[in-house]
Each structure stands twice: as C-alpha cells, then as structure tokens.
C-alpha cells in the first residue's frame, strides 16, 4: 500500500507538533513498505524481495548513512526504496515522491546519491571471466547455441535521454533520438561481464569497442576463447562475426549457431530495460544518465546472481536494429577470418 498523500511542506495553519508527528508516521510507513507488500508485489514495485532489499541496505549503508541525527532525515532504507522505485518505473520524480511520501527534490537527491554509490561498485560486480569461470562460460554458450569456445557476447544498446544543454548534436543517434550508447558484454546466463557507459548516441558501436579498455586488453592478451558480435563489429581473432553471405552449408551452420548463442546479449538488453524501466527514457543530463545506467547494471548483476525472479515477459529480446557495416580500422581482419574459417572446418 502506498503512503498517505499529504502536503510535505508545513502549512501555516498547522501546529508544528502535529506536522512533525505526521512526518514521523510517513517515515515509518515508508520504512515498513517491504513488509506491508506480499512478495510478488515487492518484485513488481521495487524489482527485489525483502531479503534482497536487506542485502542492498547492508551493502550501501557505509556510503549512504547520513551523519545527521535529525528525525526527518532519510534513512538508508528509505533512500534505497526511493531509488529502486524510480529505477523500476522510470516515472517523474514528483510521482515517485508522492508514492514514497517525500518531496520531489528529495527524490532527485536520493536517485543521484544512490546511483553514484552503486556505480562506484561496478568493478566489484562487473568483471571479465577469470580462469576458473571461463570453462563454465564455454559450456553454457555451447548448450545455448552449439557454439564452441565462446566466453561472451557483445552489443550496444541505446538509453534515450532528454536533449542535453551542451553538445546536443553529439547525442543524436541514427534514429534521430537523443541517447547514450552503452556497450555490454555478457555470458550465457545474462551476467554482465564488461560495460562501457560514457559515449553519446551518435558514436558507432565499433568505435566504442575500439576506445575501450576491453579492446586494448584483449588485443594485448588474447583470451582463451572467443566473443560473438554482430556485423557492426570487425572480425578479429577473438571477436567472431557472422558471414555476411553463407556460401557453403558449413558457413550457414556457423551463422545459425552464432545467432543462437549471440541471442544472450539480445535477451540481456531486453531484460535490463524491462527490469529497470527508467532505462527506456531518462529525463537527465548525460553524466547523471550514465550514473543511473551503471547503477542499473550493477543491480542487474546482483539480481541475477541472487536469482531474483523476473516477470513472465521480462526475458524477451530487445528488437534488433539495422547494424552498419564495420569500419575499416581492423588491421587483424585477415587473422580473424582465418580463425573463423578454422572454427567452421573443425566444428561445422
């Protein structure tokens, strides 16, 4: 049940004692929200259950705990619930504030603070597979699409934002909307293993890859496995793209397996925006939008690792765009083609 909707600024005719007593009632109501809802309702409203919310409270308490002891200061529990409600529904701050019993400016501050705090944990919760995880990643991708030696699937997704005040033209994507272009790498279980959240919507997917630490690392230290990308990416020794034209049955079988295995990243993009509806459109400046997006990425990995359930329609893949041809920046294309041909010969 939502909190009572009452004025949150003290009317001149209301006795101060009554006013602050009412605020304390609202505060207690918000703190009790996770325990007032049934578990399915918690997932719908906050995307997490009671135990998961308690985990987030303990995780973020050291950085969100206010030093003030004022009776009307927001507790860590309140801050997390407010932020989760915003991430889940993506509506106006005023609407979230009315639902949670706080003023619009408080929602704005809380979303900013919680997002920055969660984003600071990205290195802890988003990491490339280690030696002991690579074998499991390969098994999972093979079960998913019969694609051998695969450790990840990569793609970009656009998070639409309001028109920025500075360098507005840089954020217009090929569909004419303002966005940030977010690069994601995931495993077959939809765990995000790498992300780049900083580029405006006009930047090509391959350009984001080329400018990433992931690209530099994998060019220097070739991984024990391959990553799957669509035709918007270059063909590299460690990055396999499909054949633009399958000239043999073996190449056609490779393309089929590639498509089935790469559907993991398509599903991830769909799940991420359905789990956190705010990512469909953020009324925020680019830097704040990046912080919110990174916060949702961290929360997604936490939810996935804790087996937080999804609604029935939350695993649909994101609709595919029209990938552009890869730009000619790849000096290893011949080696990449040789690697792909070897995979076709040995497995298909």
Image (tube, rainbow, N blue to C red):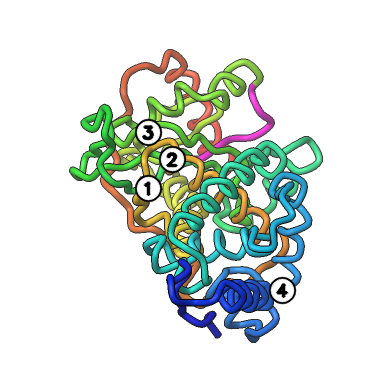
Q: Are marks 3 and 2 in contact (CB under 8 Å)?
A: no
Any part of residue 30 in sight: no
Circle 3 residue: 205
Mark 2, Cα crowd under 10 Å, few <14 / some 14-19 / many 20+, is many
Q: Are marks 1 and 4 in contact (CB under 8 Å)?
A: no
Q: Are marks 3 and 4 in contact (CB under 8 Å)?
A: no
Residue 86 magenta-highlighted = no
Circle 1 residue: 159
- Tell me the distance, in whole angstroms, between the alpha carbons under discs 3 and 2: 9 Å
- The answer to which of marks 2 and 1 sits earlier in the sequence is 1
Any part of residue 74 in sight: yes
Toward the viewer: 62 or 205?
A: 62
Q: Quadrant of the N terminus?
A: bottom right
Q: Are marks 2 and 1 in contact (CB under 8 Å)?
A: yes
Circle 2 residue: 182
Circle 3: element type? helix
- The answer to which of marks 3 and 4 sits earlier in the sequence is 4
- Tell me the distance, in whole angstroms, between the alpha carbons under discs 3 and 4: 38 Å
Mark 1, Cα crowd under 10 Å, few <14 / some 14-19 / many 20+, is many
Circle 2: element type? strand
Q: What mark, if any, has residue 50 been given in the picture? A: 4
Residue located 56% across and 47% down the image: 115
Q: Position of residue 142 (x, y in %)?
A: 62, 52
- Tell me the distance, in whole angstroms, between the alpha carbons under discs 2 and 1: 7 Å
- Tell me the distance, in whole angstroms, between the alpha carbons under discs 3 and 1: 14 Å
Residue located 53% across and 71% down the image: 100
Q: Position of residue 20 (x, y in %)?
A: 60, 72
Q: Which residues are magenta?
A: 222-228
Q: Report whether 8 appears left or right of 125.
A: left
Residue 224 magenta-highlighted = yes
Q: Position of residue 348 (x, y in %)?
A: 52, 45
């Amino acid at each position: 049940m939502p909190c009572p909707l009452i004025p949150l600024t003290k009317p001149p005719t209301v006795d101060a004692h009554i006013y602050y007593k009412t605020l304390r009632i609202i505060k207690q109501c918000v703190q009790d929200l996770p325990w007032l809802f049934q578990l399915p309702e918690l997932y719908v409203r906050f995307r997490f259950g009671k135990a998961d919310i308690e985990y987030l409270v303990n995780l973020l308490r050291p950085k969100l705990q206010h030093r003030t002891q004022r009776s009307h200061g927001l507790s860590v529990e309140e801050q997390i619930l407010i932020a989760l409600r915003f991430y889940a529904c993506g509506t106006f701050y005023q609407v979230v504030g009315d639902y949670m019993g706080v003023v619009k400016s408080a929602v704005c501050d809380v979303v900013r603070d919680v997002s920055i705090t969660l984003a600071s944990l990205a290195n802890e919760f988003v990491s490339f597979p280690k030696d002991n995880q690579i074998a499991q990643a390969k098994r999972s991708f093979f079960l998913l699409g019969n694609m051998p030696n695969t450790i990840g699937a990569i793609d970009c997704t656009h998070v639409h934002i309001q028109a920025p005040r500075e360098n507005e033209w840089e954020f217009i994507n090929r569909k004419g909307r303002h966005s940030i272009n977010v690069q994601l790498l995931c495993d077959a279980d939809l765990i995000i293993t790498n992300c780049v959240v900083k580029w405006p919507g006009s930047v090509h997917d391959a350009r984001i890859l080329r400018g990433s630490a992931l690209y530099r690392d994998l060019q220097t230290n070739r991984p024990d496995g391959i990553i799957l990308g669509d035709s918007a990416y270059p063909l590299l020794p460690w990055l396999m793209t499909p054949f633009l034209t399958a000239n043999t049955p073996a190449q056609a079988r490779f393309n089929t397996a590639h498509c089935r295995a790469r559907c993991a990243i398509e599903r991830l993009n769909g799940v991420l925006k359905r789990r956190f509806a705010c990512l469909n459109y953020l009324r925020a400046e680019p830097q704040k939008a990046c912080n919110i997006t990174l916060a949702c990425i961290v929360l997604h990995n936490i939810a996935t690792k804790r087996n937080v359930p999804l609604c029935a329609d939350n695993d649909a893949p994101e609709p595919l765009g029209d990938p552009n041809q890869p730009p000619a920046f790849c000096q290893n294309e011949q080696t990449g083609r040789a690697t792909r041909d070897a995979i076709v010969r040995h497995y298909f």
